[in-house]
Image: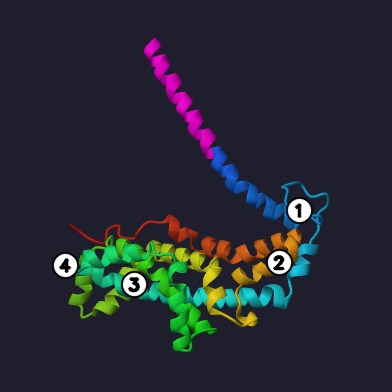
């Protein structure tokens, strides 16, 4: 009995320690979020997390202007939406042969892709900037979209290939017997069945592009083309003066598209592959 009691007390202590650690991590994430929400409604917002003295929508009224919010958000949607679409399409086309065909080059290629995901963007921006100047892609939306897609493509291919491995090849062979091509089987069979995987790649790519400050800041020069991730820097004035309430209100608006995207695909993210009963043993 004493031994069992000791073991239970140890397990209880470890569980309480783990719970305390998780609560500390949750607080570290919750406090900044609480500051953003409360400060957006506070007419006298500061750096402290506090309950507003009075609620106001004046901060939102101040930032809901074409040059402050609407144009940068539209630029962000164009850049990130175009880059995400290009990334998903190219990742699916690249992952398909890696998943369906065996070759000695598959493993070295995948390891090279994995290594490419570790390269910091700041290390390659100088040669990329020089290249974009040479090919007249600097200060262009399409050039920024191309680089967004190229920077996210390695990890997107890795993810897409792993999801694609879960789709039985027998389904494609049945389609090939009926005369379908490899591209038709990819579009009509493989991609619909790996819907959760496509959703994961889409959300991951979009979120990474949406919060990217450095790439558009370097490749875009015209202020009217700047996305919201860059225009948010305008709230930081000279000598450290910041209008915290307007900054928080803009942050809430800036986060809305990402939240909406996650809500739209949450059902697919929570679902499994629709393969039940598709393959008969």
Query: Which residue corresponds to the image point at 72% horizontal and 47% vertical from the top-left?
Result: 49
* SS of the residue under disc 4: loop
Q: Range of the magenta residues?
A: 1-22
The N terminus, quarter of image: top left
- The answer to whether 114 is drawn above or below residue 75 in the figure is above
- As drawn, the label of residue 46 is 1
Q: Residue furthest top?
A: 1
Q: Is residue 271 visible?
A: yes
Mark 4 or 1, nearer chain start? 1
| Mark 2 crowdedness (10 Å alpha carbons): few <14, some 14-19, many ≥20 | some
Give the mark toward the camera: 3 or 2.
2
Q: CA distance from mark 3 to mark 4?
A: 21 Å
- As drawn, the label of residue 92 is 3
- The answer to whether 122 is drawn above or below residue 44 in the figure is below
| Mark 1 crowdedness (10 Å alpha carbons): few <14, some 14-19, many ≥20 | some
Q: CA distance from mark 4 to mark 2?
A: 53 Å
Horizontal relation, residue 119 to residue 249: left or right: left
| Mark 3 crowdedness (10 Å alpha carbons): few <14, some 14-19, many ≥20 | many
- As drawn, the label of residue 104 is 4
Give the mark toward the camera: 3 or 1.
1
């Amino acid at each position: 009995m004493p031994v069992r009691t000791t073991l239970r007390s140890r397990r209880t202590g470890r569980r309480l320690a783990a719970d305390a650690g998780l609560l500390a991590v949750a607080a570290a994430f919750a406090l900044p979020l609480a500051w953003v929400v409360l400060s957006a409604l506070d007419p006298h917002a500061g750096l402290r997390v506090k309950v507003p003295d009075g609620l106001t929508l004046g901060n939102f009224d101040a930032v809901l202007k074409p040059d402050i919010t609407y144009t940068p958000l539209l630029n962000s949607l164009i850049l990130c939406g175009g880059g995400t679409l290009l990334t998903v399409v190219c990742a699916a086309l690249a992952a398909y042969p890696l998943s369906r065909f065996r070759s000695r080059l598959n493993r070295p290629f995948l390891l090279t892709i994995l290594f490419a995901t570790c390269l910091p963007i700041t290390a390659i921006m100088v040669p990329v900037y020089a290249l974009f100047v040479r090919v007249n892609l600097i200060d262009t939306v399409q050039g920024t979209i191309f680089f967004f897609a190229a920077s996210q493509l390695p990890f997107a291919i890795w993810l897409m290939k792993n999801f694609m491995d879960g789709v039985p090849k027998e389904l494609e062979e049945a389609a090939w017997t009926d005369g379908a091509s490899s591209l038709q089987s990819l579009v009509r069979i493989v991609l619909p069945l790996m819907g959760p995987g496509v959703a994961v790649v889409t959300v991951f790519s979009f979120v990474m592009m949406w919060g990217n400050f450095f790439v558009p800041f370097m490749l875009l020069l015209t202020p009217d083309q700047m996305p919201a991730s860059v225009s948010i820097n305008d709230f930081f004035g000279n000598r450290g003066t910041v209008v915290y309430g307007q900054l928080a209100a803009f942050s809430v608006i800036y986060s809305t598209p990402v939240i909406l995207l996650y809500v739209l695909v949450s059902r697919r993210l929570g679902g499994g592959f629709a393969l039940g009963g598709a393959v008969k043993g």
